[in-house]
Image: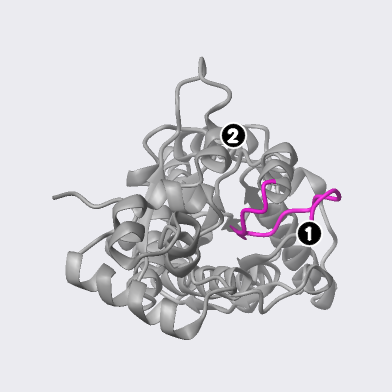
């Protein structure tokens, strides 16, 4: 027999509302009544419907992840799957299940609302380049706790974020190039209007300033976070006679494109130009030459984001504490692509 709130209430000799309060761990039930209802639930093997519980103000025991990205195949993205592994580690440790909300087609512009409406999750981890404030405001108004992976600057809603220390990572990368004797150092950045690329630019500028090197805006090159675009842009810059002896790329894929462009021009890495990437994806250590890069601890990023979300779900954080983000340290991995012999 498949039991319902009504059948459990009948067996326990109480109202449906009393059973609902017991199931959702709410107050207002006498201890002996609560014990009797719990005993019957265990004997019958009754499992409350998760969606019904959530709509009634209870818990689903699910944590969700949604990625608002530029491409639908985000599951294969070199950063996402490592962050997801960190999320999964903490979700399992805390006896939750994980739900992934996939990007929908462009014709379905309202799917992000249903994440908040259907309440299949108790909390949400939000990632991606295309996060809009209206999404987060909607979840906030629906009282759905959420945490962002990566910092954003929005004004209508309190934000809790877990982010890498992009500024210091870029500083260490540029400083390393300077220590190799490089003086004409290009910064190939990803999406220029994002928080993380702004932080990387600030770190790059800081290292140049400390070394008394001028900031040359012709050496700030937009690679749009893509390998082929970075390759084309560096080819164009070199073709116009731009002097470059060191390159810091905002991600490893762009660094690969940069090295390909240098080869197109007959230049040798690192003899002629030293190259440093960012992220330390798995291919970086096996590339030719092996890529010097800033290791972003992506699993730790997922773990810290989940820990932050769990605190929100337990009401251990207040809105006044928003903005004090969890910062995950980075580490520069020095390999062949940057070290001048």
Tell me residue 150's x, y (percent). Answer: 62, 59
Q: Is 58 drawn above or below residue 219 in the view shown?
A: below
Q: Quadrant of residue 167?
A: bottom right
Q: CA gap, disc 2 to disc 1?
A: 19 Å
From the image, give the main secondary structure of the stretch colored magenta: loop
Q: Nearer the viewer, residue 122 or 111?
A: 122
Tell me residue 164's x, y (percent). Answer: 60, 69
Q: Nearer the viewer, mark 2 or mark 1?
A: 2
Which residue appears at 52% of the width and 47% of the height?
55
Q: Is 44 covered by the magenta stretch?
A: no
Which residue appears at 54% of the width and 50% of the height?
127
Q: Secondary structure at mark 1?
A: loop
Q: Nearer the viewer, residue 89 or 165?
A: 89
Q: Is 310 drawn above or below residue 248 in the view shown?
A: below
Question: Residue pushed farthest front?
Answer: 13
Q: Is 146 covered by the magenta stretch?
A: yes
Q: Earlier in the sequence, mark 2 or mark 1?
A: 2
Q: What's the mark number on residue 158?
A: 1
Which residue appears at 84% of the width and 48% of the height?
156
What residue does disc 2 label?
113
Q: Nearer the viewer, residue 268 or 117?
A: 117
Local crowd size for mark 2, using a 10 Å CA cut-off: few (<14), some (14–19), many (≥20): some
Tell me residue 137's x, y (percent). Answer: 74, 44
Q: Which residues make up the magenta segment?
A: 142-157
Local crowd size for mark 1, using a 10 Å CA cut-off: few (<14), some (14–19), many (≥20): some
């Amino acid at each position: 027999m498949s039991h319902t709130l009504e059948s459990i209430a009948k067996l326990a000799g109480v109202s449906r509302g009393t059973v609902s309060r017991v199931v959702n761990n709410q107050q207002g039930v006498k201890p002996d009544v609560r014990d009797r209802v719990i005993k019957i639930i265990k004997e019958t093997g009754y499992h409350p419907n998760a969606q019904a519980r959530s709509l009634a103000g209870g818990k689903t025991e699910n944590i969700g992840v949604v990625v608002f990205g530029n491409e639908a195949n985000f599951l294969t993205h070199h950063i996402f799957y490592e962050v997801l592994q960190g999320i999964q580690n903490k979700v399992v440790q805390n006896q939750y299940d994980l739900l992934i909300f996939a990007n929908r087609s462009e014709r379905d512009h309202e799917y992000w609302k249903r994440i908040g409406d259907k309440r299949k999750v108790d909390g949400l981890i939000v990632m991606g380049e295309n996060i809009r404030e209206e999404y987060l405001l909607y979840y906030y108004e629906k009282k759905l706790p959420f945490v962002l992976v990566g910092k954003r600057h929005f004004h209508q809603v309190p934000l809790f974020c877990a982010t890498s220390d992009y500024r210091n990572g870029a500083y260490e990368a540029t400083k390393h190039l300077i220590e190799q004797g490089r003086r004409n150092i290009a910064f190939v950045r990803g999406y220029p209007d994002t928080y993380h690329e702004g932080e990387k630019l600030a770190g790059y500028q800081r290292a140049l300033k400390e070394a008394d090197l001028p900031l040359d805006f012709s050496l700030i090159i937009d690679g749009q976070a893509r390998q082929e675009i970075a390759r084309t842009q560096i080819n164009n810059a070199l073709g116009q006679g731009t002097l470059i002896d060191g390159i810091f790329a905002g991600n490893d894929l762009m660094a690969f494109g940069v090295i390909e462009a240098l080869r197109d021009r007959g230049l040798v890495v690192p003899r002629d130009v030293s190259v440093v990437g960012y992220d330390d994806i798995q291919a970086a250590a096996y590339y030719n030459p092996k890529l010097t890069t800033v290791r972003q601890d992506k699993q730790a990023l997922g773990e810290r984001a989940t820990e932050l979300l769990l605190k929100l779900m337990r009401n251990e954080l207040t809105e006044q504490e928003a903005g004090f983000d969890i910062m995950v340290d980075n580490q520069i991995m020095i390999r062949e692509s940057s070290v001048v012999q």
